[in-house]
Image (cartoon, rainbow, N blue to C red):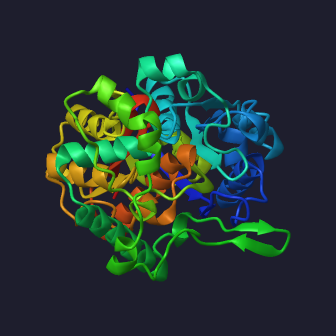
Amino acid sequence: MTDVYVLATLRTPRGKGRPGGGLSGITPLELLTRLLAGVGDRAAALPGLVEDLIVGSATQTGEQGGDLARTAAVLAGWGESASGMTLNRFCASGVDAINTAAAHIAFGSAGLIAAGGVESVSRVPMFADQAPIWSDREVVERVGSVQMGIAADLIATLEGLEREQLDGYALRSQRRAAAAWEQGRFAGSLLPVRHGDQVVLDHDETVRPGTTAESLAALEPAFAALGAKGQDDLVRRRRPEVGEIRHLHTAGSSPALADGAGIAVLGDAAAAAASGLRPRARVVAAATAAVDPVIMLTAGQAAAEKALKRAGLAPGDVDVFEIAEAFAATCLKFQRDLGVTDEQLNLNGGTIAMGHAFGATGPILLASCVDELERTGGRYGVIAVSGAAGTGSATVLERVP
């Protein structure tokens, strides 16, 4: 198999995923097209060399429908060489776009592919596709497709976690994100979004530097009412041993909804030479995993464990874990189960602080992981994201010195 390298990473800032958010006035197609133009500015040969564009998006309807990847490739002037494909593995879609691109290159069916994700939650809200897994009562019952916050509270209940622990993790995410932004750690992979000559957004908008333990403790549980409306009963019908679900997560210990996009350029050694880009990291292994849809949010961990096994690595060998913070409980469980230290996990904060842009989260994590490996001189990094219905994906990377 051919070695696959990460040659370039670029992402937008993340805007608040609601009307009035920093990116809410910009369509997902425009976000994606601007990123391609930004990547092209960094390597002029790329638009004529990229053979495919693979983009993940979790809600493929309306402004996010119709194969955004191919449309963006044409609008960005890449259309003569780059085809386009969109894919959906819920929130793990962006990781899967990267892994799919890597598989094509490793197999020899392409030499240079751009891969990533885009999501505009403010313009295309979660559940806007009215998919059966959300809207058909029979399907919801048979699949056990509980809402994400309920699954997070279920994990906290099963793991015996306390509210103070969840708040403590959330505070850590906020403090680390604020410090990373203050120190300029994201600058190398960030493309500020402009409207004409004016910068619309140049930072992750959901970071709250003033967060304190006291402000987090004052927040009410976010999912108790949803549980009382039937979600807790759905869980108990599938997992009768659970009993009472302790609703502990708040808005502060949950991932903030965000708009954003991210792209990575992947290629083999010949493509790197032709593009003039230096290989930054090698894709060592990748994996997808599935778990019980009721518990849902542990699939990213399962995928990370599977990918590490394929790479012949132990968690202790990894310098940087960039894991989507699908609620505080999943991160604490990840650390507990794998023996991952605070010095390995989400060193610059995570999606609780900086926002979860669903399909875009994977390439944003990839950019952070590669940047951090280069900053610290670490060797191995892992990115992982959990998605709805018990899906998850992960990638293992090795920095190229």
Residue furthest to the front in view is 228
Instruction: Residue 34: give x, y in percent of width and height.
Output: 74, 55
Instruction: Residue 291: give x, y in percent of width and height.
Output: 31, 28
Q: Quadrant of residue 14?
A: bottom right
Instruction: Residue 129: give x, y in percent of width and height.
Output: 67, 32
Question: Against 171, is 189 above or below?
Answer: above
Residue 44 in view here: no
| Numbered disc total | 0
Residue furthest to the right in view is 196
What residue is at 73 percent from the left and 49 percent from the top? 123
Quarter of the picture holding the N terminus: top left
Instruction: Residue 401: give x, y in percent of width and height.
Output: 33, 59
Residue 282 relative to residue 13: left or right: left
Question: Against 360, is 210 above or below?
Answer: below
Residue 199 relative to residue 93: left or right: right
* The one of 249 and 281 positioned closer to us in this rendering: 249
Q: Quadrant of residue 189?
A: bottom right
* The one of 315 and 279 positioned closer to us in this rendering: 315
Residue 48 in view here: yes
Question: Against 50, is 119 above or below?
Answer: below
What residue is at 47 percent from the left and 39 percent from the top? 229
Residue 273 relative to residue 351: left or right: right
Residue 261 relative to residue 179: left or right: right
* The one of 87 and 268 positioned closer to us in this rendering: 87
What residue is at 51 percent from the left and 54 percent from the top? 356
